[in-house]
Image (cartoon, rainbow, N blue to C red):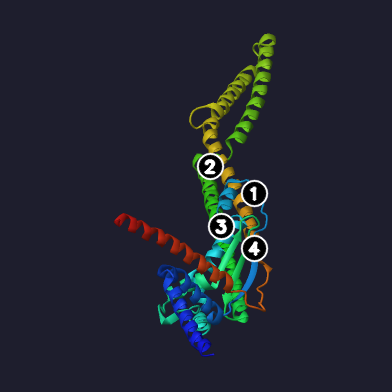
Amino acid sequence: METELNTRPAQSGTEKQSLLGRLKGINKLFAATVLAPTLLATVYFTLFASDIYVSESRFVVRSPQRQNQTSIVGALLQGTGFTRAQDDTYPVIDYIESRDALDELNRDDAIVKTYLRHGDLLGRYASMGFRHSFEALLKYYQSRIVSIDLDTTSSIATLQVRAFSARQAAQINEQLLDMSERLVNRMNDRAANDTVRFAQQQVDIASAKAREAVAAVAYYRNANSVFDPDRQSALQLEQTTALQAQLLAARTRLAQLESIAPNNPQINALKIEITGLEGQIHANTGRVMGGKDSFAAKAAQYERLQVDAQFADKQLTESMALLETSRAEAARKQLYLERLVQPNTPDEATEPHRLKSVFVVFILGMIIWGVSSLLIAGMREHRD
């Protein structure tokens, strides 16, 4: 019995020495890079890490199909209009992650109070009391609170909001969607106003050109005592044709009288009539095809003014029609944010991924330990 009693303390002491020996035999580098971080991560994620609730919603920015503009002014207006809906999703995403969105969410320090007073020591905002500033809040907001992903194939954006309570996560998600809808409405208003303003400017320019063209035609008519050179030329030619017919008849009668009764007193009257008709024909021909004051000379300048007036009038008509189209387009939404999935209120926490996080810490520690061991071994070989 005494031998057994003496043997047990000896064995116990031997086991303690063996355990201490094993602990001392553990590589200090391995303990520092693998065991200690893994142990700390296990303790933190098991006992201290707060539950994080994720509220998710999905939306898409759509635009109605529009007809292509075929006119020159229409093409210019189309250049000032809207792009594809997928392209317009990116401004919404940038806005959700921007300072402006955070500033609106953080009215009365709502975000600061929510994420400063809740959560564990490492997960909350301004943990350990450091960096209590808006820039720090923005980084925390972009990395810890909001994440958004865009599927370029379907143009569907997925918005996720993380908070330490399910109600807060759903509330912030709803606020962000409301703010995004207001942003899209502002984009609609701005684009519509720009389009209508541009169309109105084109109408004003076309109206001014039309007035100038009409005034130029009126001034030319008054300055040159002409209404329509082409029509007036036609009238003069008709009169000339009639006078030539009268002249031919008078010459025929004169020839008959001179052959039958040379002393007939009507011969002198016919000669006077023929001379008058020839003068009228010459005058009419001169007005139509004479020098710089003839209708032919005036017709070229008048025709140019008429073409300018017709073009200005056509441009004015087209601009006014385009203005009405622009106003009709502005009256309806060009872009709208459609919610495909409403913000949900999660019934359980989905983050943090505790086991996965501990495993990641362990793997990173192993990598660091392996690289460090190789470096130390290389340095020792280099010394030797």
Q: Residue at x 40, y 77 (%)?
A: 131
Q: Going from the N terminus, do you reach mark 2 or mark 4 first?
A: 4
Residue tagged 3 = 200
Q: Going from the N terminus, do you reach mark 1 or mark 4 first?
A: 4
Question: Considering depth in this image, is 79 or 242 the residue closer to the camera?
Answer: 79
The amino acid at mark 1 is Asn
Question: Considering depth in this image, is 285 or 372 the residue closer to the camera?
Answer: 372
User: Pointers 3 and 1 in contact (CB under 8 A)?
Assistant: no
- Disc nearest the viewer among 2 and 4: 4
Question: Could you tell me if residue 229 is visible in this image?
Answer: yes
Q: Going from the N terminus, do you reach mark 3 or mark 1 first?
A: 1
Q: Is residue 132 left or right of residue 93?
A: left
In terms of secondary structure, where does tag 4 sit?
Answer: strand
Q: Is residue 54 left or right of residue 44?
A: right
Q: Going from the N terminus, do you reach mark 2 or mark 1 first?
A: 1
Q: Between marks 2 and 1, how big is the CA–CA gap?
A: 42 Å
User: Pointers 1 and 4 in contact (CB under 8 A)?
Assistant: no
Residue tagged 2 = 221
User: Pointers 2 and 3 in contact (CB under 8 A)?
Assistant: no
- Image location (x, y in percent) of residue 221: 53, 42
Question: Considering depth in this image, is 184 or 265 the residue closer to the camera?
Answer: 184
Quarter holding residue 296: top right
Residue tagged 1 = 68
Quarter holding residue 273: top right
Question: Could you tell me if residue 189 is visible in this image?
Answer: no
- Disc nearest the viewer among 2 and 1: 1
